[in-house]
């Protein structure tokens, strides 16, 4: 009898140790470095040429090495509401005074041009042009080299979030706060529009088939064809303010104000969901191993496997509002916080090159290209 009790106690002790180790593994986050930026980090960093470029709410662009060393800071003297876009060894960013700026990779100003009203989106590149819309709904096609206005069109639709360019269909897809998703040609002519029931503040995402995923504040994630036809919609329990990302299999991932992080199949069926203690507003990112990383408004960062198993979590000082990204050539996750910090974590793999849309604005350059 004593032997049975002893054996039973030993088994229980082993189980306790295994459970404790699993919990420890989940809780231990692989933080590499943390750098103060001086102001709230905005959006998703642009990454390229071995450097990190991140914008701040106070109007600065900060350039860092992958080890977290600040190389230079440029002050645009106006609030910035969206991340910069990196193209052809230049940075392009709009500001709250309605100016679009072009800078070199060393922070030197090349040109700036006034676009009449605050710019809350990231400019997108298509061939030799930049496509951008100000918050009053005026569309501009700008020559990328000299900053000259090639086309100007009045849309009359308030725009509070970046649009994206689908290079296969040559459509500029822009969410509006008057309940629409607009699809325009490169010269700004509206091709079609889809009306939602709520304000649209999230950046769209694209699948490999050029279908469009749009998260709306009307609680729904919509999947549309390239022609704007509704394929399906998924109802969350509350607002969807973060943007979706899409893995290699076409599964979508999005966090909601309802304090759930969702994984949906290509057909719009719920694969899994994970409950947390605070709303999600930051867009997630996917690495090449299929792991997903997201941050919520409590300042907690989560890492899950593709099947929804929690790998680790880390509590920062404040709100995570900007999009997360994994670097394309290094196993590093970058997370900007509202407290003015940029944090870096070790990941299992580099950015998800197999994924259809692994981060906010599509790729490390923030220019809508697929990885």
Image: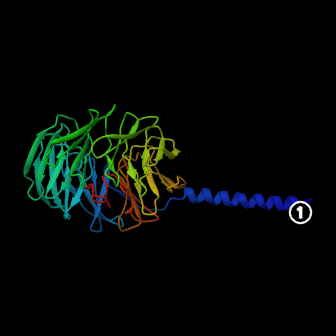
Neighbours of disc 1 within 10 Å: few (<14), some (14-19), many (20+): few
Residue 327 lies, in percent from the top left, at 36, 63
The N terminus sits in image quarter: bottom right
The C terminus sits in image quarter: bottom left
Q: Residue at x 39, y 43 (%)?
A: 281
60 over 241 or under it: above or below:
below
Q: Quadrant of residue 248?
A: bottom left
Q: Residue at x 40, y 63 (%)?
A: 332
152 over 251 or under it: above or below:
above
Rendered image coloring scheme: rainbow
Residue 111 lies, in percent from the top left, at 10, 56
Q: Quadrant of residue 224?
A: top left
Q: Residue at x 67, y 60 (%)?
A: 18
Q: Report the number of discs.
A: 1
Q: Quadrant of residue 240?
A: top left
Query: Relative to residue 23, is residue 356 drawn left or right?
Result: left
Query: Relative to residue 163, is residue 299 drawn left or right?
Result: right
Residue 84 lies, in percent from the top left, at 24, 54
Q: Residue furthest top?
A: 197
Query: Relative to residue 91, is residue 16 drawn left or right?
Result: right
User: Where does label 1 land, which residue?
Assistant: 3
Query: Relative to residue 332, is residue 54 drawn left or right?
Result: left
Residue 254 lies, in percent from the top left, at 42, 46
Q: Secondary structure at mark 1?
A: helix
38 over 14 or under it: above or below:
above
């Amino acid at each position: 009898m004593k032997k049975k009790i002893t054996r039973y106690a030993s088994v229980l002790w082993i189980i306790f140790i295994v459970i404790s180790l699993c919990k420890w593994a989940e809780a231990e986050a692989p933080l590499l470095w943390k750098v103060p930026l001086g102001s709230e980090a905005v959006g998703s960093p642009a990454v390229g040429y071995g450097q990190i470029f991140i914008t701040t709410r106070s109007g600065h662009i900060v350039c860092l090495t992958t080890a977290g060393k600040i190389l230079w800071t440029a002050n645009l003297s106006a609030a910035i509401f969206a991340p910069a876009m990196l193209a052809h060894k230049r940075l392009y960013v709009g500001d709250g005074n309605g100016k679009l700026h072009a800078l070199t990779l060393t922070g030197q100003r090349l040109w700036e041009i006034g676009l009449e009203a605050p710019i809350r989106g990231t400019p997108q590149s298509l061939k030799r042009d930049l496509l951008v819309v100000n918050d009053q709904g005026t569309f501009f096609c700008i020559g990328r080299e000299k900053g000259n206005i090639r086309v100007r069109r009045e849309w009359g639709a308030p725009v509070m979030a970046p649009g994206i360019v689908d290079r296969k269909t040559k459509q500029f897809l822009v969410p509006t706060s008057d309940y629409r998703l607009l699809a325009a040609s490169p010269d700004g002519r509206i091709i079609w529009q889809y009306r939602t029931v709520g304000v649209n503040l999230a950046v769209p995402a694209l699948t490999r088939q050029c279908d469009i995923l749009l998260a709306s504040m009307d609680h729904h994630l919509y999947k549309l064809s390239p022609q704007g036809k509704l394929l399906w919609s998924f109802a969350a329990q509350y607002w969807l303010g973060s943007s979706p990302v899409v893995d290699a299999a076409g599964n979508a991932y999005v966090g909601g104000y309802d304090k759930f992080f969702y994984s949906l199949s290509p057909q719009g069926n719920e694969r899994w969901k994970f409950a947390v203690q605070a709303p999600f507003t930051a867009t997630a990112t996917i690495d090449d191993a299929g792991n997903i990383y997201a941050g919520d408004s409590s300042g907690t960062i989560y890492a899950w496997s593709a099947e929804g198993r929690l790998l680790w979590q880390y509590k920062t000082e404040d709100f995570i509002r900007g999009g997360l990204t994994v670097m394309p050539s290094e196993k590093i996750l970058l997370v900007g916080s509202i407290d003015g910090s940029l944090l870096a974590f070790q990941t299992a793999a580099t950015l998800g090159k197999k994924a259809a849309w692994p981060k906010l604005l599509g790729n490390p350059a923030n220019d809508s290209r697929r990885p």
